[in-house]
Image (cartoon, rainbow, N blue to C red):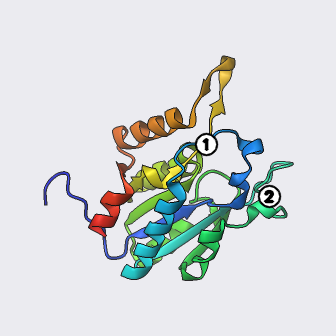
Amino acid sequence: MTENAIEIAPDSALIVIDVQQGFDDAAFWGPRDNPAAEGNIAALMDAWEESGRPLVLVRHASVRPGSVLAADRPGHAFKDFVADRAGRAALHVTKTVNSSFYGTPDLGEWLTARGIRQLVVVGIQTNMCVETTARMGGNLGYEVLVPLDATHTFDLAGPGGLTLTAAQLAAATAVNLHGGGFARVLTTAEVLAAA
């Protein structure tokens, strides 16, 4: 195997994070990047089903007042293409923070019980819950793969009037994860070709 070759383990877990209807509320979130994200996520979910690999669905139940992702709001629901495939999931995790490793049931315990060591992490938002989950996965010793084009995010304002576009934030996530050694950043096509 060459240094650049990708090998998808037979038990590699696809972690689909927060692909929820509330993220379609442009008035709440602002401009987004990567309109192809949902199609790429769906293609990966289908490939995982076809190969018999485990699928994990993670959903955010926000505790912030007024959040479109609160458990009692319509936006908490999965986007339709995920809801249509939800019955295929081996595990459903609900979380209230950025990391999928801090949810219920416990993702780490579930992975350990099955001996799973490779994670493919996709979903929303690239620089928030996807990046946090990938970083923690790397810290915990998992081999983490992030097909960046199966994620998306939104423009974000920071300190001192600084605002970064969604594309800039996604690029920063790619550099943070790949350059920092937390995860290998790939494309959906690369993952599908290896799966």
| Numbered badge on residue 13 | none
The residue most toward the left is 1
Q: Residue at x 43, y 70 (%)?
A: 13
Q: Residue at x 58, y 69 (%)?
A: 57
| Quarter assignment of residue 105 | bottom right
Name the spot of residue 77 as percent of width and height, x first. 73, 66
* Mark earlier in primary sequence (1, 2): 1
| Residue depicted at x 51% and y 36% | 167
Q: Residue 52: image x %, image y %?
A: 40, 82
Callout 2 secondary element: loop
In which quadrant is the C terminus drawn?
A: bottom left
User: Is residue 43 visible to us here?
Assistant: yes
- Report the residue marked by disc 1: 32
Q: Nearer the viewer, mark 1 or mark 2?
A: 1
**Tags 1 and 2 touching, CB below 8 Å:** no
Amino acid tagged 1: Arg
Q: Determine whether the residue tagged by mark 1 lies in a helix, strand or loop.
A: loop
The one of 25 and 9 positioned closer to us in this rendering = 25
Residue for badge 2 = 70
Mark 1 vs mark 2, CA separation in Å: 20 Å
Residue 59, quarter of picture: bottom right
Residue 110 x, y percent position in the rendering:
52, 74
Task: Single out the residue that lies furthest toward the top.
Answer: 160
Query: Residue 67: percent from the left, percent from the top?
Result: 80, 50
Q: Can residue 105 be seen in this view?
A: no
